[in-house]
Image (cartoon, grey):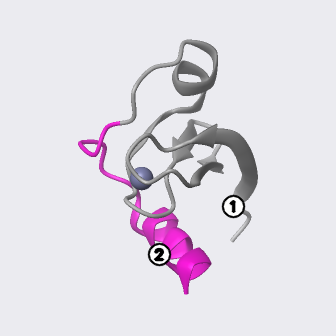
Amino acid sequence: MGLFHMDLTLSCPTCGVHLVRVAPSRYLDLAVCPKCLASGPYEAIVENEAELTSDLQLPDDVADYLRGLRA
Ligand SMILES: [Zn+2]
């Protein structure tokens, strides 16, 4: 699975852990908290300081991948 992943310097306001950027496809580029899985569109989060939301349904492979990071 060619999941692009990069650690960000931004932190989750809830958990205080660094967000990661995951881009599972060319159409999906997300900033996600690996702990609570709150997420948002990468550009909106990084460039517009948008807030993370837990409403966004992460693709299963992305959620599995992030759970793997914590294990
Ligand atoms: Zn969090």
Neighbor class of circle 1 (other Cα within 10 Å; few <14, some 14-19, many 20+) is few
Instruction: Give 12 or 61, whichever is nearer the viewer.
Output: 12
Relative to 55, is 69 on the left or the right?
Answer: right
Q: In this view, does 56 lie above or below 2?
A: above
The part of the chain drawn in magenta is: 53-71
At x 62% / y 24%, what residue is drawn? 46
Q: Report the Cα–Cα distance between label 1 and label 2.
A: 12 Å
| Residue on which disc 1 sits | 3
Amino acid at dot 1: Leu
Mark 1 or mark 2, which has the lower sequence index? 1
Q: Mark 2 falls on what kind of element? A: helix
At x 39% / y 35%, what residue is drawn? 52
Instruction: Give 38 or 30, whichever is nearer the viewer.
Output: 38
**Mark 2 lies within 8 Å of ligand 1 (Cβ measured):** no
Neighbor class of circle 2 (other Cα within 10 Å; few <14, some 14-19, many 20+) is few
At x 47% / y 75%, what residue is drawn? 64
Q: In this view, does 70 lie above or below 51?
A: below
Q: Mark 1 falls on what kind of element? A: loop
Q: In the drawing, what numbered circle is on residue 62?
A: none
| Residue on which disc 2 sits | 64
Q: Name the quadrant of the C terminus.
A: bottom right
Q: Name the quadrant of the N terminus.
A: bottom right
Asked if labels 2 and 1 touch by Cβ distance under 8 angstroms, the answer is no
